[in-house]
Amino acid sequence: MTVLPRFSPLLGKARVIPVITLDRVEDAVPLARALQAGGIDVVEVTLRTDAALRGCEAIARECPDLVLGIGTVLTASQIGEARDAGAHFLVTPGTSEKLGHAVAASGIPCLPGAATVSEMVALMEMGFHELKFFPAEAAGGVDYLKSVAGPLGDLRFCPTGGISPANAGTYLALGNVLCIGGSWMVPKAAISAGHWDEITALARAAAALGQ
Ligand code: 3PG
């Protein structure tokens, strides 16, 4: 079986990954710096807005110590765009066979998304062992991850979707959870108002959850 580069060596101390959606390119760097100031070492920027790729380029240039993931990758053409924008790793919300093979061929570490056991098995067949579990809460949450730990014991997950400070600790306590992702520490209102201290405080609390 192909040996694919793993995501886990990129993880730092914080086992919590902010999932960022950027409405304005100019918010990217102050936001990234605010998160780093709170102890966050890995972020995911979603490709859901026009500002995303240019925002990522700015983060890659200005915050070289931050591990930059580019998420919501849905097509093979976005893989090259993400690489050019400085992605250290990729994230997909779900993974078709076509997308999975394209990501595997790129040589870029990836957390391919899966929500069912069959999708997880298909990704294992492609050589992936570290997956995004999305949408975590809606797809069965902590109980689902506990249930797959037996039959799919080699898999490790980054659950995202519906995670908050209230349930984060329960996920992080699972043996098959590498890290968790979520948007609670990057609220839209705080970003648009430039309330970077608020974001640093949220990041600090989030980073402490996984330590
Ligand atoms: C994701 O893409 O992982 C989710 O949008 C993040 O989920 P959340 O907004 O429920 O934290």
Image (tube, rainbow, N blue to C red):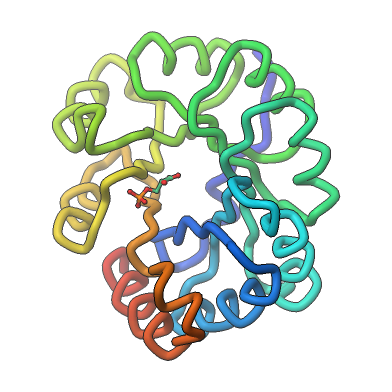
- Counting from the top left corner in percent of width and height, residue 160 is at 36, 44
Relative placement, left or right, of 28 versus 120 is right
Looking at this view, name the residue that lies furthest to the bottom. 197
Residue at horizontal 80 percent and vertical 54 percent from the top: 85
Foreground residue, 193 or 81? 193
- Quarter residue 56 falls in: bottom right
- Quarter residue 211 falls in: bottom left
- Counting from the top left corner in percent of width and height, residue 20 is at 51, 59
Foreground residue, 54 or 175? 54
Q: Compared with residue 109, is residue 203 higher up or lower down, i.e. above or below?
A: below
Relative placement, left or right, of 159 versus 1 is left
Relative placement, left or right, of 28 versus 148 is right
- Counting from the top left corner in percent of width and height, residue 40 is at 48, 72
Residue at horizontal 68 percent and vertical 73 percent from the top: 65
Foreground residue, 203 or 171? 203
* Viewport quadrant of the N terminus: top right
Relative placement, left or right, of 78 versus 74 is right
- Quarter residue 203 falls in: bottom left
Q: Compared with residue 13, is residue 172 higher up or lower down, i.e. above or below?
A: above
Residue at horizontal 67 percent and vertical 13 percent from the top: 98
Residue at horizontal 35 percent and vertical 85 percent from the top: 201
